[in-house]
Image (cartoon, rainbow, N blue to C red):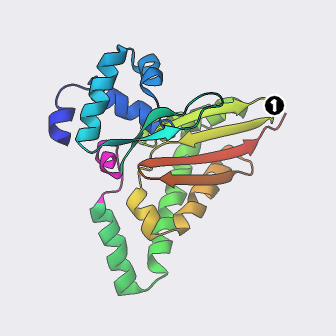
């Protein structure tokens, strides 16, 4: 299924639908029309096809007023469409290191990896400060496959970088210490305290890094 879908073109309507749903908590056909720019019936037919292929499912989403509306969300099967920087082979290497050299060995390797990643980001962002630095980091994470977006909550005076894909999902599950390494990376690069919050439901992944504004 994946090869057939991806070979159509980088601008495949189905792939665009999957990417928009990935960047959300689930979307209705009407919302997808606004984001993808296709007709209601066109979007609906693509969604029916994606559901039949096992990449999305539906649920009734509560609304403030009126009846709940039907919305689409990704299934676990849709993970194959989103990038992973560290394939299964890398996870097997870490597992083998743990088996041969002990439980602390993978953590030492991961520490070195995140130290190098931090240095790489800092070099690329060295001329940026304030909001520009947050935006720059979000862009770098986007380029690394994390589907990252920057936003600023003006009322709470909070900077947020939200990621809708984990490019290291397999490693995260096997080595939870990565959660702390990611937070520490953000704190060092952004030069401020950062809160990391992660949410996973079915095919949904959302990780938010939040920091208070200095001003």
Q: Which residues are magenta?
A: 76-87
Of residues 26 and 9, which is closer to you in this image?
A: 26
Query: Quadrant where the N terminus lies?
Result: top left
Image coordinates of residue 67 in percent, x first then y, are: 56, 31
Image coordinates of residue 140 in percent, x first then y, are: 50, 38
Image coordinates of residue 196 in percent, x first then y, are: 64, 53
Q: Is residue 38 left or right of residue 116?
A: left
Above/below status of 110 relative to 43: below
Q: Is residue 119 left or right of residue 174?
A: right
Residue name at image x 35 percent, y 56 percent = 86
Image coordinates of residue 150 in percent, x first then y, are: 60, 33
Residue name at image x 43 percent, y 30 percent = 20
Residue name at image x 55 percent, y 34 percent = 149
Is-magenta flag for residue 85?
A: yes
Q: Is residue 22 left or right of residue 207?
A: left
Picture quadrant where residue 53 is located: top left
Furthest-front residue in this view: 67
Which residue position holds label 1? 155
Q: How many marks?
A: 1
Q: Secondary structure at mark 1?
A: loop
Q: Is there any visible trace of residue 183 in the rendered image?
A: yes
Residue name at image x 34 percent, y 48 percent = 79
Above/below status of 172 relative to 213: below
Above/below status of 134 relative to 106: above
Is-magenta flag for residue 64?
A: no
Picture quadrant where residue 170 is located: bottom left
Q: Is there any visible trace of residue 128 in the rendered image?
A: no
């Amino acid at each position: 299924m994946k090869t057939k879908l991806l070979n159509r073109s980088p601008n495949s309507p189905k792939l665009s639908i999957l990417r928009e749903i990935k960047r959300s908590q689930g979307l209705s056909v009407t919302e997808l029309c606004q984001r993808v720019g296709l007709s209601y019936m066109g979007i609906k037919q693509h969604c029916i096809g994606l559901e039949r292929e096992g990449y999305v499912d539906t649920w009734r989403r509560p609304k403030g007023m009126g009846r709940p509306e039907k919305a689409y969300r990704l299934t676990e099967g849709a993970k194959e469409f989103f990038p992973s920087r560290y394939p299964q082979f890398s996870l097997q290497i870490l597992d083998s290191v743990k088996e041969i050299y002990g439980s602390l060995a993978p953590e030492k390797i991961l520490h070195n990896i995140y130290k190098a990643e931090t240095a790489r980001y800092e070099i690329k962002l060295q001329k940026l400060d304030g909001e520009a630095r947050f935006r720059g980091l979000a862009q770098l994470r986007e380029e690394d496959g994390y589907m990252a977006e920057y936003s600023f909550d003006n009322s709470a005076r909070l900077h947020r970088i939200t990621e809708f894909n984990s490019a290291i999902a397999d490693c995260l599950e096997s080595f939870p210490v990565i959660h702390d390494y990611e937070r520490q990376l953000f704190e060092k690069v952004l030069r401020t305290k950062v809160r990391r919050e992660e949410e996973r439901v079915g095919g949904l992944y959302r990780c938010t890094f939040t920091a208070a504004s200095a001003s």
